[in-house]
Amino acid sequence: PVALPPGKVGQPEWSPDGRRFAVTVTTRDVIRLWVCDVATAKLQPVPTGPLNAALGDPVRWMDDRTLLVKLVDVGR
């Protein structure tokens, strides 16, 4: 089992090697990124700005260790 943070947890986006998955967690004010290591079942927040999910999925794996993330421009 994986302990989930408060908020609405999105669908998992699996890394190509299957060792990790990324999820979005939506709260009333913001969407944040979390990543889980499957071997330890630990879900950790990723220190990014708020995610931008206005046009499609804000998270995609580039390779086994790198995520591409769409962020909200904080200076907008």
Image: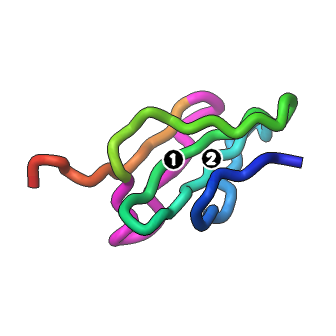
Q: CA distance from mark 1 to mark 2?
A: 7 Å
Single out the residue that lies furthest toward the left.
76
Identify the main secondary structure in magenta: loop
Which residue is nearer to you in this view: 29 or 35?
29
Which residue sits at x=26%, y=54%?
72
**Picture disc at residue 59:** none
> At label 2, which amino acid type do we have?
Ala
> Magenta span has 17?
no
Percent across and percent down for residue 15 are: 68, 41
| Residue at screen point 50% across, 63% down | 26
Helix, strand or loop at mark 2: strand
**Residues at discs 1 and 2 in contact (Cβ within 8 Å):** yes
In percent of width and height, residue 59 lies at 49, 52
List x then y, in percent, for residue 1.
Answer: 90, 48
Q: Along the line of sight, which residue is nearer the eye, 59 or 5?
A: 5
Residue at (52% x, 50% y) in the render:
60
Residue at image mark 2: 22
Nearer-N-terminus badge (1/2)? 2
In the image: residue 60, left or right of residue 18 = left
Region of the chain picked out in magenta, as a range: 51-65
Q: Is residue 4 left or right of residue 68?
A: right
Residue 60 within the magenta-colored segment of the rendering:
yes
Please identify the quarter of the rendering in which residue 53 is found: bottom left
Quadrant for the C terminus in the image: bottom left
Which numbered circle lies on residue 33?
Answer: 1
